[in-house]
Image (cartoon, rainbow, N blue to C red):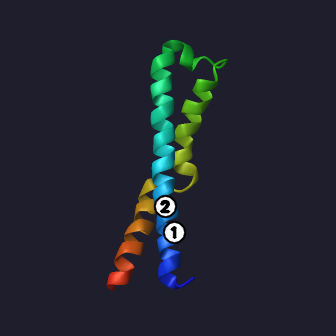
Amino acid sequence: MDKLGVDAARADISMLKIVAPKMCEDVSSRAMQIFGGMGLMEEMPIQRFWRDSRLERIWDGTSEIQRHIITRSILRPLGA
């Protein structure tokens, strides 16, 4: 795979690393709204999903780093 192909693959992965944790957070937040106060109880799995979804955005690298990788893959072919 050439250099541009590798950059494109990294950009695709970075896009997924931005979108997937955000979607997980949105879904778990909506579920938390549905469950209300019960969603915060430790016996309910939704509280763990909600808590873990917040951490997921940090584990794979911050969104700013992922955006930097995407921008670099767009600008590199243009000689920038």
Q: Nearer the viewer, residue 59 or 26?
A: 26
Question: What is the quadrant of residue 79 in the picture?
Answer: bottom left
Q: Secondary structure at mark 1?
A: helix
Q: Is residue 80 visible?
A: no
Q: Which residue is mark 1?
A: 10
Report x, y in % for residue 15: 45, 58
Q: Is residue 21 above or below residue 45?
A: below
Q: In which quadrant will I find the N terminus?
A: bottom right
Q: Residues within 10 Å of mark 1 (few under 14, many from 20)?
A: some
Q: Pointer 2 and pointer 1: residues touching (CB < 8 Å)?
A: yes
Q: Is residue 25 above or below residue 66?
A: above
Q: Is residue 55 above or below residue 63?
A: above
Residue 54 is labelled as: none
Residue 14 is labelled as: 2
Q: Is residue 79 above or below residue 6?
A: below
Q: Secondary structure at mark 2?
A: helix
